[in-house]
């Protein structure tokens, strides 16, 4: 049967919960692969990189598909480790629904709570799948209480388990009943009205409410199973097909609109980008224009004809709702947009760990920098810049990402790299407005054949560095104007306090040149001097990254935890609960997060559940 609709489903979980094993089972059960791959054996379909297979973890999002009835299901297997959170956030934008995986043994883990919080914020249709019901220590009934308490109260099981924790564990269907109706009544007015009236909702009413509330992301069906043995997987597939709606197609002919959410390197330096299409269609050789947001806030265009198109599922044309591997001359980056941006666009928290990379062998210094630039060109969140003594500065999310990057450089590029210990990255923002100008050499001491006047002032949060001008367009030759703009951006990489300057608006307010004496080099040299003077007059403030945290602690540990976190500069925003635990929320500097994680077990007898995520940065506090 030819598929009539496409669902893009993400599988998300805490590391080691069984995401890749579930993906293999789904593909095998529906004939997409001939044999069942194993994470331990390193022969799974989606973890196809050498590093992924050796470490047994997912590093990059991967796409595979299977067909059930008239529905094609594209599976996006995402990383579980927190260092690769950006990969997960990119995938979320292109999904129609998600499966949040839990282990029946380990239960609700810190990363699981972060993922569910994000899924609920995006209102993404999500099914909860409790995996590993056959493992000793599996506790599906107690885990349901934990899910309601720690993840979401708006959940109801559609299956039950017999023989939990043994090889004889089996899944039994559990039709919606009175308990389901009570759970749905909290989010569905019609079910609530039927319960209040005393008539009660019918089975059809419950089925309709379950589908509607799952579709709008306010309710979450829960199912059980074992990915390795296949128990419960047919029920999960049935739930996905029945409860997750495909996005509506745009009426009439529509221009193609989509998002690049992953990039893979290919042979001969060719990069393959994964494009999710929302509207329109794309055929080979069609000319497309993508919009790209640069690190400094600018939006540029990338245009070219499609030289390679591999549609997931094997179709010749990429149609709305589907995904394809695509190549365009010049290469695409993660985050490039085809047409207007999608409605659901995640805001990526920038990496906060800064390190310096050097080649272990001096003769590999140039290849190292070229390799890092190539990797950064694929991933806009991997920031690469110059450092002292010919080294390269990097921004990353964590130590595991650093280890994976070192292995990638060695295996894919043949370069052995050494990473300095990571430290938290600071940024500067203008405190006010400052202006400076320099005239040509007969009026001052600079000896540059140029006149440059610049004003530096604060820009909106998240705007990056914006360059504009008040001078008359065409007052400078294009080469001179470009020299000023390029130098402004280069100069802002290191502000008066030694950190990059961001959220800054720089305006060219005065310009002049002398033909034929003036050169672009004159404007480059003078622009740096003038801009630094303008920044000094504006003043800058150092900011450091913060993390928002949640920690669940036993009641008798509450005082010890708050007293232990206060010296780490934690600002508490709430304390709720009391039985059987307290939930403490707040924010603290990113540089103190690791210290907090190490301190909590001793304060709570190892019973604390901690999660944190990047929050808005704050001015750096004076150190005493």
Image (cartoon, rainbow, N blue to C red):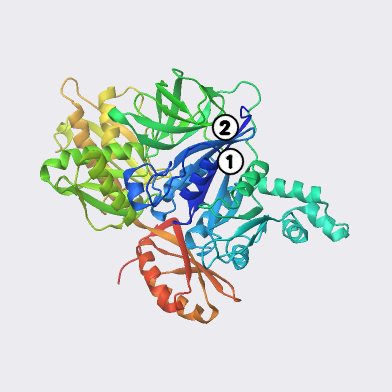
**Of residues 43 and 393, which is closer to you in this image?**
43
Q: Is residue 346 visible?
A: no
Q: Residue furthest top?
A: 285
Q: How many marks?
A: 2
Q: Is residue 451 visible?
A: yes
Q: Which mark is residue 321?
A: 2
Q: Residue furthest bottom?
A: 556
Which residue: 74% across, 61% down?
179
Which residue: 18% across, 30% down?
521
**Of residues 242 and 281, which is closer to you in this image?**
242
Disc 1 packing (10 Å; few <14; some 14–19; many ≥20): many
Residue 192 falls in image quadrant: bottom right
Please state, as top left, top right, bottom left or bottom right, where the N terminus lies in the image. Answer: top right
Q: Give above or below for 157 relative to 505.
A: below
Q: Secondary structure at mark 1?
A: loop
Residue 445 position in % (x across, y down)? 14, 38
**Of residues 547 and 209, which is closer to you in this image?**
209
Q: Give above or below for 482 relative to 128.
A: above
| 465 to the left or right of 130 | left
Q: For the residues marked 1 and 2, what is the alpha-carbon distance in whole angstroms?
A: 9 Å
Which residue: 50% across, 63% down?
109
Residue 146 position in % (x across, y down)? 59, 66
Disc 2 packing (10 Å; few <14; some 14–19; many ≥20): many
Q: Give above or below for 597 relative to 360.
A: below
Residue 380 position in % (x across, y down)? 37, 40
Q: Secondary structure at mark 2?
A: loop
User: For mark 1, what is the residue?
Assistant: 96
Of callouts 1 and 2, which one flags the residue occurring earlier in the amino acid sequence? 1
Q: Are marks 1 and 2 in contact (CB under 8 Å)?
A: yes
Q: Residue furthest front?
A: 168
């Amino acid at each position: 049967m030819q598929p009539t609709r496409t669902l893009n489903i993400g599988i998300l979980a805490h590391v080691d919960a069984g995401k890749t094993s579930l993906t293999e089972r789904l593909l095998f059960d529906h004939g997409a692969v001939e044999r069942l791959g194993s994470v331990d054996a390193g022969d799974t379909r989606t973890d196809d990189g050498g590093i992924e297979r050796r470490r047994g973890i997912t590093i990059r999002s991967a796409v595979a598909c299977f067909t059930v009835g008239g529905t094609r299901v594209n599976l996006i297997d995402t990383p579980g480790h927190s260092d690769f959170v950006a990969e997960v956030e990119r995938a979320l934008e292109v999904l129609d629904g998600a499966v949040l995986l839990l282990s029946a043994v380990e239960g609700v883990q810190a990363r699981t709570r972060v993922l569910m919080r994000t899924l609920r914020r995006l209102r993404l249709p999500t099914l909860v799948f409790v995996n590993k019901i056959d493992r000793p220590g599996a506790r599906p009934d107690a885990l349901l209480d934990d899910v309601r308490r720690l993840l979401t109260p708006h959940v109801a099981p559609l299956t039950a388990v017999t023989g939990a924790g043994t090889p004889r564990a089996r899944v039994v269907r559990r039709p919606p009943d009175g308990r389901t109706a009570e759970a749905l009544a909290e989010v569905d007015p019609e079910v609530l009205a039927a319960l209040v009236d005393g008539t009660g909702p019918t089975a059809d009413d419950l089925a309709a409410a379950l589908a509607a509330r799952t579709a709008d992301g306010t309710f979450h069906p829960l199912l059980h199973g074992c990915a390795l043995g296949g128990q419960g997987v047919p029920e999960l597939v049935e739930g996905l097909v029945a409860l997750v709606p495909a996005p509506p197609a745009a009426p009439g002919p529509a221009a193609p609109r989509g998002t690049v959410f992953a990039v893979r390197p290919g042979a001969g330096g060719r990069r393959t980008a994964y494009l999710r299409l929302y509207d329109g269609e794309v055929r080979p050789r069609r000319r497309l224009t993508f919009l790209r947001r640069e690190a400094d806030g600018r939006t540029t265009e990338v245009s070219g004809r499609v030289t390679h198109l591999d549609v997931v599922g094997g179709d010749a044309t990429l149609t709305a709702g589907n995904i394809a591997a695509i190549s365009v001359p010049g290469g695409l980056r993660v985050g490039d947009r085809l047409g207007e941006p999608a409605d659901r666009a995640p805001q990526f928290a920038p990496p906060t760990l800064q390190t310096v990379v050097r080649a272990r062998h001096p003769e590999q210094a140039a290849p190292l920098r070229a390799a890092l630039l190539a990797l950064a060109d694929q991933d806009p969140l991997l920031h690469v810049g110059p450092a002292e003594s010919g080294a390269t500065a990097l921004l990353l999310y964590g130590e595991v990402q650093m280890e994976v990057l070192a292995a990638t450089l060695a295996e894919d590029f043949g370069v052995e790299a050494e990473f300095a210990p990571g430290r938290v990255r600071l940024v500067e923002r203008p405190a006010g407005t400052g202006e400076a100008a320099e005239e040509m050499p007969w009026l001052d001491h600079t000896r540059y054949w140029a006149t440059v006047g610049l004003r530096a002032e604060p820009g909106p949060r998240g705007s990056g560095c914006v360059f504009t001008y008040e001078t008359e367009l065409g007052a400078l030759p294009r080469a001179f104007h470009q020299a000023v703009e390029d130098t402004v951006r280069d100069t802002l990489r290191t502000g008066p306090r030694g950190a990059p300057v961001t959220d800054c608006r720089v305006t060219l307010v005065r310009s002049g040149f002398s033909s034929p004496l003036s050169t672009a080099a004159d404007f480059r040299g003078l622009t740096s001097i003038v801009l630094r003077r303008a920044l000094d007059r504006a003043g800058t403030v150092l900011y450091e990254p913060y993390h928002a945290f949640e920690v669940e602690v036993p009641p008798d540990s509450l005082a010890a935890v708050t007293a232990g976190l206060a010296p780490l500069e934690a600002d508490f925003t709430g304390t709720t609960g009391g039985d059987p635990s307290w939930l403490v929320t707040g924010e603290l500097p990113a540089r103190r997060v690791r210290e907090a994680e190490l301190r909590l077990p001793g304060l709570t007898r190892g019973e604390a559940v901690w999660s944190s995520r990047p929050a808005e940065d704050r001015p750096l506090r004076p150190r005493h």
